[in-house]
Amino acid sequence: MKNIFLITAFIFCPSLLLFANEKSLDIGLKFQKSIGLYYENGFMLQYSDPEYLYLDNAEIGFSYVSSRLGSAIGSNALKQDSYILNLTYKYFSFWKIDPLLRLNIGYFYSDYESDIFKNLDNSSLLFSCELGAKINTNSPLNINISLGYNFITGDGLSGAGSLYPVFYQMGVSWDLYYKDSAK
Protein backbone atom coordinates (compact mmCIF):
# COMPACT_ATOMS: atom_id res chain seq x y z
CA MET A 1 0.00 0.00 0.00
CA LYS A 2 2.91 2.33 0.76
CA ASN A 3 4.21 1.70 -2.77
CA ILE A 4 0.84 2.73 -4.27
CA PHE A 5 1.04 6.02 -2.33
CA LEU A 6 4.63 6.69 -3.45
CA ILE A 7 3.80 5.96 -7.11
CA THR A 8 0.74 8.23 -6.92
CA ALA A 9 2.80 11.00 -5.32
CA PHE A 10 5.52 10.65 -7.97
CA ILE A 11 3.01 10.89 -10.83
CA PHE A 12 0.67 13.60 -9.50
CA CYS A 13 2.92 15.84 -7.40
CA PRO A 14 4.73 17.51 -10.35
CA SER A 15 1.43 18.16 -12.11
CA LEU A 16 0.01 19.79 -8.96
CA LEU A 17 2.70 22.47 -9.28
CA LEU A 18 0.50 23.89 -12.02
CA PHE A 19 -2.05 25.02 -9.42
CA ALA A 20 -0.85 28.07 -7.48
CA ASN A 21 -1.51 31.78 -6.95
CA GLU A 22 1.24 33.91 -5.44
CA LYS A 23 4.71 32.53 -4.93
CA SER A 24 5.14 31.28 -1.41
CA LEU A 25 6.94 28.53 0.42
CA ASP A 26 5.55 28.00 3.92
CA ILE A 27 7.47 25.72 6.25
CA GLY A 28 6.19 25.07 9.73
CA LEU A 29 4.75 22.93 12.47
CA LYS A 30 1.44 21.09 12.37
CA PHE A 31 -0.59 20.13 15.43
CA GLN A 32 -3.41 17.65 14.85
CA LYS A 33 -5.92 15.89 17.13
CA SER A 34 -8.18 13.02 16.16
CA ILE A 35 -11.43 13.51 18.05
CA GLY A 36 -11.60 10.70 20.57
CA LEU A 37 -7.98 9.61 20.16
CA TYR A 38 -4.44 10.99 19.91
CA TYR A 39 -2.57 14.23 19.53
CA GLU A 40 -0.30 14.04 16.50
CA ASN A 41 2.32 16.66 15.75
CA GLY A 42 4.78 17.12 12.93
CA PHE A 43 5.80 19.45 10.14
CA MET A 44 4.19 20.92 7.06
CA LEU A 45 5.27 22.43 3.77
CA GLN A 46 2.96 24.49 1.50
CA TYR A 47 3.98 25.83 -1.92
CA SER A 48 2.44 28.10 -4.54
CA ASP A 49 3.87 29.97 -7.55
CA PRO A 50 2.12 32.41 -9.97
CA GLU A 51 4.15 31.13 -12.90
CA TYR A 52 1.85 28.11 -13.02
CA LEU A 53 -1.45 29.97 -12.46
CA TYR A 54 -4.23 27.68 -13.69
CA LEU A 55 -6.35 27.66 -10.53
CA ASP A 56 -6.39 30.89 -8.51
CA ASN A 57 -5.52 30.81 -4.82
CA ALA A 58 -4.31 27.21 -4.70
CA GLU A 59 -1.40 25.64 -2.87
CA ILE A 60 0.09 22.17 -2.80
CA GLY A 61 1.68 20.74 0.27
CA PHE A 62 3.15 17.88 2.20
CA SER A 63 2.89 17.14 5.88
CA TYR A 64 4.03 14.49 8.28
CA VAL A 65 2.23 14.04 11.60
CA SER A 66 2.89 11.39 14.21
CA SER A 67 1.69 10.45 17.65
CA ARG A 68 5.41 9.83 18.31
CA LEU A 69 5.66 13.63 18.54
CA GLY A 70 2.37 13.93 20.44
CA SER A 71 0.42 11.54 22.66
CA ALA A 72 3.02 8.74 22.44
CA ILE A 73 5.78 10.83 24.04
CA GLY A 74 6.37 9.23 27.42
CA SER A 75 3.16 7.18 27.32
CA ASN A 76 1.77 3.85 26.22
CA ALA A 77 -0.11 5.36 23.24
CA LEU A 78 0.16 3.71 19.83
CA LYS A 79 2.87 5.09 17.63
CA GLN A 80 1.26 6.09 14.35
CA ASP A 81 2.52 8.09 11.38
CA SER A 82 0.72 9.88 8.54
CA TYR A 83 2.36 11.10 5.32
CA ILE A 84 0.02 13.51 3.54
CA LEU A 85 -0.03 15.31 0.17
CA ASN A 86 -2.61 18.07 -0.12
CA LEU A 87 -4.19 20.53 -2.48
CA THR A 88 -5.54 23.66 -0.76
CA TYR A 89 -7.88 26.22 -2.28
CA LYS A 90 -8.23 29.56 -0.49
CA TYR A 91 -11.35 31.66 -1.06
CA PHE A 92 -11.24 35.47 -0.94
CA SER A 93 -7.48 35.59 -0.52
CA PHE A 94 -7.53 39.38 -0.20
CA TRP A 95 -9.00 39.13 3.31
CA LYS A 96 -7.08 38.88 6.60
CA ILE A 97 -8.73 35.49 7.09
CA ASP A 98 -8.85 33.26 4.02
CA PRO A 99 -11.45 30.48 4.16
CA LEU A 100 -9.92 27.31 2.75
CA LEU A 101 -10.82 23.89 1.46
CA ARG A 102 -8.12 21.21 1.54
CA LEU A 103 -8.08 17.75 -0.06
CA ASN A 104 -5.58 15.25 1.31
CA ILE A 105 -4.24 11.93 0.09
CA GLY A 106 -1.62 9.93 1.90
CA TYR A 107 -0.46 6.91 3.80
CA PHE A 108 -1.17 5.96 7.43
CA TYR A 109 0.80 3.46 9.50
CA SER A 110 0.28 2.36 13.11
CA ASP A 111 2.96 0.42 14.98
CA TYR A 112 1.12 -1.99 17.30
CA GLU A 113 4.50 -3.12 18.81
CA SER A 114 3.29 -6.62 19.67
CA ASP A 115 2.92 -9.88 17.76
CA ILE A 116 -0.50 -10.36 19.36
CA PHE A 117 -1.87 -7.79 16.91
CA LYS A 118 -0.07 -9.02 13.77
CA ASN A 119 -3.38 -10.12 12.17
CA LEU A 120 -4.92 -6.65 12.49
CA ASP A 121 -4.63 -4.06 9.74
CA ASN A 122 -2.14 -1.39 10.75
CA SER A 123 -1.90 0.71 7.60
CA SER A 124 -4.25 2.48 5.25
CA LEU A 125 -4.45 4.90 2.39
CA LEU A 126 -5.63 8.33 3.52
CA PHE A 127 -8.26 10.37 1.76
CA SER A 128 -9.71 13.31 3.64
CA CYS A 129 -10.97 16.85 3.27
CA GLU A 130 -10.69 19.85 5.56
CA LEU A 131 -12.60 23.09 5.89
CA GLY A 132 -10.90 25.94 7.71
CA ALA A 133 -9.16 29.28 7.50
CA LYS A 134 -5.70 30.72 6.96
CA ILE A 135 -4.93 33.79 9.05
CA ASN A 136 -2.68 36.33 7.34
CA THR A 137 -0.58 38.34 9.78
CA ASN A 138 1.05 40.83 7.35
CA SER A 139 4.33 39.11 8.17
CA PRO A 140 6.00 35.89 7.08
CA LEU A 141 4.13 34.12 9.89
CA ASN A 142 0.98 32.24 8.80
CA ILE A 143 -1.54 30.37 10.92
CA ASN A 144 -4.15 27.95 9.62
CA ILE A 145 -6.85 26.03 11.41
CA SER A 146 -9.28 23.46 10.07
CA LEU A 147 -11.69 20.67 10.81
CA GLY A 148 -11.28 17.52 8.74
CA TYR A 149 -12.93 14.23 7.90
CA ASN A 150 -11.19 10.97 6.91
CA PHE A 151 -13.24 9.09 4.32
CA ILE A 152 -11.22 5.90 4.83
CA THR A 153 -11.32 4.50 8.38
CA GLY A 154 -11.40 1.04 9.85
CA ASP A 155 -12.25 -1.16 12.79
CA GLY A 156 -8.94 -3.04 12.98
CA LEU A 157 -10.17 -6.02 11.00
CA SER A 158 -10.90 -4.12 7.80
CA GLY A 159 -8.71 -1.05 7.85
CA ALA A 160 -6.57 0.44 10.59
CA GLY A 161 -8.59 0.62 13.80
CA SER A 162 -6.81 3.70 15.14
CA LEU A 163 -7.60 5.86 12.10
CA TYR A 164 -10.53 7.93 13.37
CA PRO A 165 -12.81 9.88 11.00
CA VAL A 166 -12.93 13.41 12.51
CA PHE A 167 -9.89 15.54 13.31
CA TYR A 168 -8.90 19.15 13.75
CA GLN A 169 -5.56 20.76 13.11
CA MET A 170 -3.57 23.95 13.44
CA GLY A 171 -0.51 24.84 11.43
CA VAL A 172 1.99 27.59 12.19
CA SER A 173 4.33 28.34 9.31
CA TRP A 174 6.91 30.80 8.01
CA ASP A 175 6.82 31.99 4.37
CA LEU A 176 10.38 31.89 3.03
CA TYR A 177 9.38 33.97 -0.04
CA TYR A 178 7.60 36.70 1.93
CA LYS A 179 8.13 40.25 0.70
CA ASP A 180 6.89 43.15 2.80
CA SER A 181 4.47 45.13 0.62
CA ALA A 182 5.13 48.28 2.70
CA LYS A 183 8.69 48.60 1.34
Image (cartoon, helix red, strand yellow):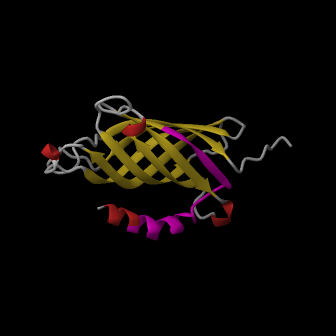
The stretch drawn in magenta includes residue 121: no
Q: Which residues are magenta?
A: 7-30
Residue at 38% in and 38% down: 68
Determine whether 177 is above or below 35 in the image.
below
Between residues 131 and 71, which one lies in front from this camera angle?
A: 71
Q: Which residue lies most toward the right here?
A: 183
Between residues 158 and 116, which one lies in front from this camera angle?
A: 116
The stretch drawn in magenta includes residue 22: yes
Location of the C terminus (image quadrant) = top right
Count of residue discs? 0
Q: Which residue lies most toward the bottom here?
A: 11
Determine whether 29 is above or below 177 in the image.
above
Q: Position of residue 124 (x, y in %)?
A: 28, 53
Residue at 77% in and 47% down: 179
Residue at 53% in and 51% down: 89
Q: Position of residue 7 (x, y in %)?
A: 39, 68
Q: Position of residue 16 (x, y in %)?
A: 52, 64
Residue 101 falls left or right of residue 98: left
Q: Position of residue 111 (x, y in %)?
A: 28, 45
Residue 174 falls left or right of residue 41: right
Location of the N terminus (image quadrant) = bottom left
Residue 182: image quadrant is top right
Residue 71: image quadrant is top left
